[in-house]
Amino acid sequence: MADMSLKKTPITEQPPQERICNFKEVSLGYTADEAVKEAGRCLNCKNKPCTTGCPVNVRIPEFIAKVSQGDFEAAYDIIKSTNALPAVCGRVCPQENQCEGKCVRGIKGEPVGIGRLERFCADYMMDKQKAAVKPEPNGHKVAVVGSGPSSLTVAGDLAKLGYEVTVYEAFHTAGGVLMYGIPEFRLPKEIVSKEIKALEELGVKIMTNMVIGKVLSVDELIEMGNEAVFIGSGAGLPRFMGIEGESLVGVYSANEYLTRINLMKAYKDGFETPILESESVAVVGGGNVAMDSARSAKRMGAKNVYIIYRRSMDELPARKEEVHHAMEEGIEFKLLNNPVRILGDENDRVKSIEVIGMQLGEPDESGRRSPVEIKGSEHTIDVDTVIMAIGTSPNPLIKKTTPGLETNKRGCLIVDESNATTKEGVHAGGDAVTGAATVILAMGAGKKAAAEIDKYIKSK
Amino acid sequence: MFKIIRKKQLNEQVVLFEIEAPFIAAKAEAGQFIIFRLDEQGERVPLTIADYDRQKGSITIIFQTVGASTMKLGELNEGDYISDVVGPLGTPTEYDDNIRKVAVIGGGVGCAIAYPQAKKLFNMGVEVDLIAGFRNKDIIILEDEMKAVSTNLHICTDDGSYGTKGFVTDKLKELIESGNKYDEVIAIGPVIMMKFISKLTQPYGIKTLVSLNPIMIDGTGMCGGCRVTVDGKIRYACVDGPDFDGHKVDFDELMKRNSTYKKQEAEHICRLTGGKRNG
Ligand SMILES: Cc1cc2nc3c(=O)[nH]c(=O)nc-3n(C[C@H](O)[C@H](O)[C@H](O)COP(=O)(O)OP(=O)(O)OC[C@H]3O[C@@H](n4cnc5c(N)ncnc54)[C@H](O)[C@@H]3O)c2cc1C
Ligand code: FES
């Protein structure tokens, strides 16, 4: 008989006042006992609604059954058979819109903590993994552009089939957003590094500092003997609002702010990358990127951190847990407000941001109620730093330098149902195709693309 | 890892490195740059590609040891390695086929970047007046090299200790006023110099190209830190530049943006040099 408690088994977290002074992980994860207890809440439904909510169809009730029996290794193997990066997904997936959103236990009370259990299994197995056996080479070469979750999945799946895979990454470190975007306190970088090391053990070659479209073109990758190319270059181009004052000193894109902190470790002693010492920070936007920027700013020592978002709490696109954590950490939510301009002092350094109040009108075509300005409600908030986290789009560099590669009007690569682009031999997936989305969708696309690339090469 | 195969101290503060980087050397063009990261803890710093040797697979960079990172870089020697070098970044400089005569202006270490431009133009058969400005005689760099790729080389020093006394702007003005007809002026050096050269050439209607050096991280368009205002529009120097029409650049904004981390830099250098340089 299942444990019928309405709430998830509590998880230990660093207390807010403590964690805003460090970059260590917020959630400490379940212990084995806690995991077994939480697994006991699963009803093992026959029709598995949770699994249908998972973009990569992890066999959730099955793995949870193993957890409840204390067979964590078997549980892990079940997850791993469809999800290449469980330690990452358990931490960053928007479970409330996916598996947990469909959980029957969520109708009355809280859903089963599927994400927490996934993370537990992955963490439990972290140091117990057998070294990968390098598969027999099959004599075919594939190039992968970018090293975010979509690319890592393609590389891993193809390497396991014996392909000689080379990953080309523009930055000096592989991992994509997992490395430069999502902060340490949500996703320790050591986890990502381990995943990349495991790929290298499988024989994947990772070349960093290689900007494809500059140092080598996609056509040159093909000329070098790669029979297929996968493009997983993400959606890294930041958007600004186009309002007055965006070039003032102290206005960052979230990409720049987070890269300085996460990739370049501006928060650590001994690292050279500078970052402004901010006292009051306005973060514009309401997604995960905005929450990450705000919470990072707090940890960098800012006293006041505001989230400025033009819709209301119900529309915040960020993961629920991040919003909850941000509130606990003292981030102030200035909802239903939209920036009008940024004001500077005599040295052109940010001194305040002017916002206008908004109210929600009729729902637009996406079903979200669109915000409308309230005339005369303008007011300023004193800040010395503004971080723009209002979205990103794919970088046009590869499209510009690759004849035959088509994008849609949002700059996203056009692919068919087999993830093939408009150019022969070139597949694509992840944010480069969808625009900014999620880790799990990028991985799902990678999984599919790898299978299609294998089919494509074998049918030649 | 990228190996330093040649080091030459050009003056007390300016160093030349030739670095083994076959992929970059195969593609580099005048006007492009690289971003280096010295080691695990280093920051990412852009430097223009001063020269390249496709056959040897090497590129040359010339830098002034002014910031914390370039000071540390300058301490490396032949045979040492730089952790990361990425490039070639930016859009190569484009010149009209029908230009006949240009003035290339280099200010200080900017001469290292002006030099490959002069070389390219000179080899295209263009008449090149090269004006190189330095504070004083002791810090003159690349004199022979510049002489070899120019029709006339004019060296100016602020204190008159070598060549003509005065600023490069004075020299350029003199040359224009004395009847030299330039199809284009190329100015590379401190922002303030590029600003005044552009101001000078505007009334004469001479097309003026400047090479901008904003703060950068990735160099591929993903951070927006390098944004500059050109003709009232935001442009990313790392992908749309670094060359821009000098008559349209908002130099004052660039100078202010470049001073973003002045405080942090000063503290940092202070730590590195034991306080000697606190500026
Ligand atoms: C701050 C932040 C927080 C997020 N939080 C979450 C979250 O909690 N949950 C979630 O599910 N999703 C989250 N996301 C979204 C998620 O990270 C992305 O959807 C996912 O990483 C996309 O993966 P990808 O493989 O398409 O590309 P990316 O991870 O974007 O990686 C692309 C890689 O390609 C490289 N590249 C680009 N151009 C080139 C080139 N020309 N040559 C070589 N390499 C190139 C880039 O440097 C980068 O490393 C977040 C994103 C950000 C920015
Ligand atoms: S350096 Fe980041 S966008 Fe130009």
Image: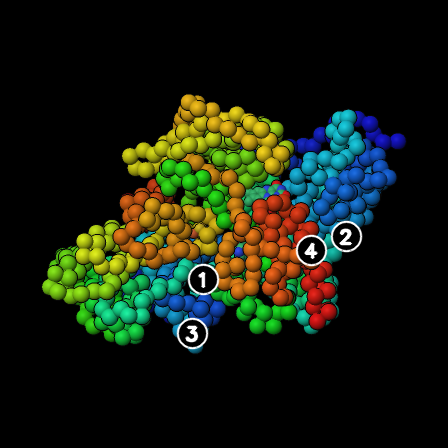
Q: Earlier in the sequence, mark 1 or mark 3?
A: 3
Front position among marks 3 and 4: 4
Residue located beneath label 4 in the image: A417
- Within 10 Å of disc 1 (Cα), the crowding (few <14, some 14-19, many 20+) is many
Q: Name the quadrant containing residue A95.
A: top right
Report the residue marked by disc 1.
Answer: B87
Q: How far, Cα to Cα, is label 1 from label 3? A: 14 Å
Q: Is mark 2 within 8 Å of ligand 1?
A: no
Q: Residue at x 54, y 69 (%)?
A: A220
- As drawn, the label of residue A81 is 2
Q: What residue lies at 38% left-to-right and 53% top-to-bottom?
A: B237
Q: Residue furthest top?
A: A376
- Looking at this view, name the residue that lies furthest to the left: B178
The amino acid type, in three-letter code, at marker 3 is Arg
Left or right, residue A218 beside residue B193: right
Q: Is residue B145 above or below residue A120?
A: below
For disc 3, the neighbor class at 10 Å (few under 14, some 14 to 19, many from 20) is some
Q: Quadrant of the C terminus of chain A?
A: bottom right
**Residue type at mark 1?**
Gly
Q: CB of mark 1 within 8 Å of CB of mark 3?
A: no
Q: Are marks 3 and 2 on the same chain?
A: no
Quadrant occupied by the N terminus of chain A: top right
Q: Chain of mark 4?
A: A
Discs 2 and 4 carry the same chain letter: yes
- Residue A261 against residue B147 in the figure, above or below: above
Q: Which type of secondary structure does the marked residue at label 2 adopt?
A: loop
Q: The disc labelled 2 sits on which kind of residue?
A: Ser
Disc ID at residue B54: 3
Do the dots labelled 3 and 4 sit on one chain? Answer: no
